[in-house]
Image (cartoon, grey):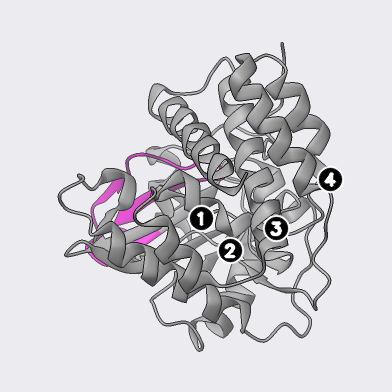
Amino acid sequence: MSVSQGNSVPTERPVPDLDLARQLVREQFPRWAELPLCPVEPQGWDNRTFCLGSDLAVRIPSARGYDAQVEKEHRWLPVLAEVLPLPIPKPVAKGAPSPLFDGPWSVYAWYPGRTLNRSGAREADLAAVAVGLGEFLTALRAAPTQDAPPPGAHNCSRGAEFTVYADEAILALAGLAPEVREIGERCVRRATESSWIEAPVWLHGDIAPGNLLLSEGRLSAVIDFGCSAIGDPACDLVAAWTMFDRETRPLFVRAAGLDQETWYRAQGWAAWKAAITLAGADSMPEVRSLAERTLVELAEDVAQQA
C-alpha cells in the first residue's frame, strides 16, 4: 500500500549538502567563510542544517516546496520572540537565490543544548518538559495574529480542519493490525466531528522531539517554525502521546489548557501521523518506534476516556 507522508513535496532540486552550504556562505557572506562548517545530526525533512562556527547555523530548504518558509520565518520569528517565554530561532541573515542555489536560505543564531530525542531518559526531566511545553504553547496562542499566514501549502495545512488528512489517515490505518486500526479509526472519526470555532491562533505545526532543545533536563528552546501558521492549535498537542506518558501527560494537558473537543482533534492528528509513518515503507526504525509508542499511548488514553 502506498500512503503519502502528508508533509511531502516534490524534490525538484538536489538535496543540499555540506559542499553547497560552504559555497553559499563564501559567495554571499564572506565574513563567515573561514568559520568551520559541519552538518547537524539528525537532519530534518524540510531543511538541511549546518553548524557554522560556534554560534551560527545555516539552513537550506531541501525542496522548492519549502522555500516559502524562509520568508515567513524571517518575517514572523522576531515578532513571536517578543512574547514567548523561551528562545526560538533568531534570523541573522537571509541568503538570496544564485547560480549555486535557486532559492532562499538562512543563517540563524545557534542555540546550545540537546534535542529531546537525543537526550537520554535520565537527562530529561519529562515532568518539567511537559509543563514548560504546555506553557510555551499557551503563550504562543496569545501572540499577535494580524496579517499572520493561515494554513496552506507553505506549512502542509497544519492548523487547518482535520478533515484535510482524515481520508489519508483511514487509508493508512487500514493496513495495520485490527486492534490498532480500531483505536486509530475511533480517534480519526471523533476528530472530524468538531472544529476550532475561536479566532485563529498561532501554532508551531511540528512539535516533535527533534524540535525541542533541553538544558539540564529542562526545555530551553523551541526550534523549526517552518510549519507555523494561525489556525486550529490541535495539531500542536500531539506531544501528549508522542512524548509523554500516563504520569506526565496530565501535566502537559493542564499547562496547555484548551477544551476537550480540541484534545479529541489532537488525538486524530496523532493517529494520522503514527498511521502514515507505519504504513510507509521508508520510515527509519527510530521513527517507526515512536509511531508504535504513540498508538500504544493513544489506546491507553482512549480506554481511560471510555
Nearest the camera: 97 or 120?
Answer: 120
User: Can residue 112 be seen at all in this image of the molecule?
Assistant: no
Residue at the top extreme of this rendering: 1
Read off the magenta span: 33-57
Q: CA distance from mark 3 to mark 1?
A: 20 Å
Whether label 4 touches label 2, CB < 8 Å: no
Task: Identify the residue under disc 1.
Answer: 207
Residue type at tag 1: Ile
Residue 164 picture location, percent across and down: 83, 44
Q: Is 162 above or below relative to 280?
A: below
Is residue 289 shown left or right of residue 180? left
Q: Nearer the viewer, mark 1 or mark 4?
A: 4
Residue type at tag 4: Thr
Residue 76 picture location, percent across and down: 62, 77
Task: Identify the residue under disc 2.
Answer: 204
Residue drawn at point x = 48 percent, y = 32 percent: 296
Whether label 3 touches label 2, CB < 8 Å: no
Q: Is residue 50 magenta?
A: yes
Q: CA distance from mark 4 to mark 2?
A: 19 Å
Residue at the front extreme of this rendering: 306
Task: Identify the residue under disc 3.
Answer: 68
- Mark 1, secondary structure of its residue: loop
Q: Residues within 10 Å of mark 3 (few under 14, many from 20)?
A: some
Nearest the camera: 222 or 263?
Answer: 263
Q: Nearer the viewer, mark 3 or mark 4?
A: 4
Residue 216 picture location, percent across and down: 16, 65
First of labels 1, 4 by sequence position: 4
Is residue 39 shown left or right of residue 60? left
- Mark 4, secondary structure of its residue: helix
Nearest the camera: 109 or 215?
Answer: 215
